[in-house]
Image (cartoon, rainbow, N blue to C red):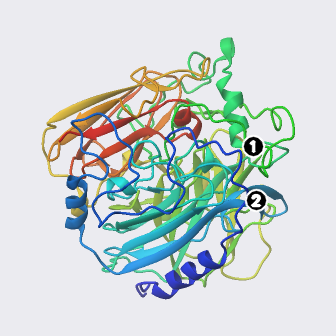
Amino acid sequence: MRTTPTRRAILGAGIAAAGSGLLAACSNSGGSGGSSGSSGSSGSNGPKNGVGRSDSPTGPEGYVSPDGAEVAAAEAARGSGPVRKVKLTAAPTRLDLGGRTVATWAYGDQLPGQEVRVTAGDTLAVTVANHLPQSTSMHWHGLALRNDMDGVPGLTQRPIKAGAAFDYRFAVEHPGTYWFHPHSGVQQDRGLYAPLIVEDPKEPLKYDKEWVVVLDDWVDGIDGSTPDAVLAELRKGMGGMDHGGGMDHGGGGMDHDGGGMDHSGHGMSGMSYRSYQKAPADSPTASPSGPPGPSRMMMGATSPLLGGDAGDVAYPLHLVNGRTPDAPQTFRAAPGDRVRIRFINAGGDTAYRVCLGGHRMTVTHTDGYPVEHAETDALLLGMGERYDVLVTAGDGVFPLTALAEGKRASGLALLRTGGGAAPEKSVRPKELDGRLLTAGHLKADASVRLKPGAPDRTVTMRLTGSMAKYDWAVNGRRYDPDQRYPVRAGERVRLSFVNATTMWHPMHLHGHTFALPGGGPRKDTAIVLPGKSLDVDFDARNPGLWMLHCHNVYHAESGMMTVLGYRK
């Protein structure tokens, strides 16, 4: 077996493809600036001598600012390696999902967007051009990067207005599987996402091939639906038919880790709570009149693994690498090849139970960090969560199935190593019902385990709200960028999540990774089951203002997010 080499050639090809895929600019009129920010300049903005930014928002005094000297010092300590330049354009387009063509927004003309691949130690320089009819942003999900590059409008930067561009530049310190997407409204539930793979120059794993697998729940452009219309419907709530704040749909907070919590991770971009305006009439995803599309509010989706209610949204499609089960992607290998699969859940409201039919998987990483290797038949991935696994390919054609947990639907891709007919799109491999690992079953690799120590500070995050009013919040307060929970550099901080709702929430922290209890894995997202609590610890070593939020895009945009702020 050989170690997969560093893919400089692949990166160069990716950059060329991204550059050649830039689309013509559309009209700048009629754009809402996104719900989480103030207006910005219309030109390209970048670091001023690597220290400050002319366009950083301001906030309460006494906190480290996103473009402050403390942030610049932390970035300098990361070093400055070879610069990898990428150009990305967010624009309206039409995508073929495999038998279904939709009008949506994306980076270029493919789904997922063009993969960006760098090596740990590189400096990533990305110009994001906004050809959308409204403001946007770019969040680098899971990376511990400089604060003014984190991509949260109204907190770490001003929004990228329609017709404008923004230059992101930061050191990429830690290898792993990551991804990027907007942090503006519910844009991430369109086609605006792509993988970011950071290779390890001292890669310890041995494998022959690599397969990046991105999972997604899809509604945009189907029968007139848009994510904005879905959010508008959800915000009306369900009154006495509440399925998130009163009714028990089975499972009722069941614990499948034996320790009072399910720690399978989650991660989506957090958005502001302020209302998003309906898409402008010239948007390719706008309906000519009235609320676009049929009702997408989901009823009766239940999962014991998720403690009961599985989700809010009835998605018409579930995709694997941008393809429906009617026309799945086929990955080719030879029998006996050792394949590294990097799973990314880019969904907005769906957890996926995944397996590769006829194979066992060896889990090696989660959320970019190594774990003690563990074998499993299936995995549960929450939104934004990532897992890396190794499999030894058998001989034949095998289904990679992504079951939409609790939603009675699935996505599909194929591994082909030989001849034979492909399985039916409705295939349900037995591995889905075999051994299933969640993050709470895993242990961090010794190389990344937090040193033992009591917390210097405990921050309690009570998760509140219900489906009745769709009033999701943290400690009863909807998101306000000026409301901050203070921490200080050098502290060991404990986040104590208390889920006071009857729905599961994948909680995601920007700019850091935390450790799950009892030597558990390093994560940037963790599921907190309904009626349960979860304590996670992290070391405060990355100054700035950092978002903490539910990675369900609709919960976050409705208010379930807040800010951890480093005190000066």
Residue 304 can be seen in this image:
no
Q: Which residue carries the number 2 mark?
A: 324
Q: Position of residue 109 (x, y in %)?
A: 71, 68
Judging depth in this view, the residue of 188 and 161 nearest the camera is 161
Instruction: Name the residue at 14% across, 47% down.
Output: 490
Q: Residue at x 45, y 42 (%)?
A: 154
Give the left or right position of residue 284, taking residue 15 as reference: right
Sooner in the amino-acid sequence: mark 1 or mark 2: 1
Amino acid type, mark 1: Pro
- What residue type is disc 2 on? Thr
Please tell me whether mark 2 sits on a helix, a strand or a loop.
Answer: loop
Where is residue 547? Give x, y as percent: 39, 42
Position of 508 compared to 564: left or right?
Answer: right
Which image quarter is the N terminus in? Answer: bottom left
Quarter containing the C terminus: top left
Question: What is the tally of numbered marks visible in this picture?
Answer: 2
On the picture, is 19 further left or further right than 452?
right
Measured from the top left, where is residue 481 in percent x and y? 40, 34
Q: Which residue is mark 1?
A: 280
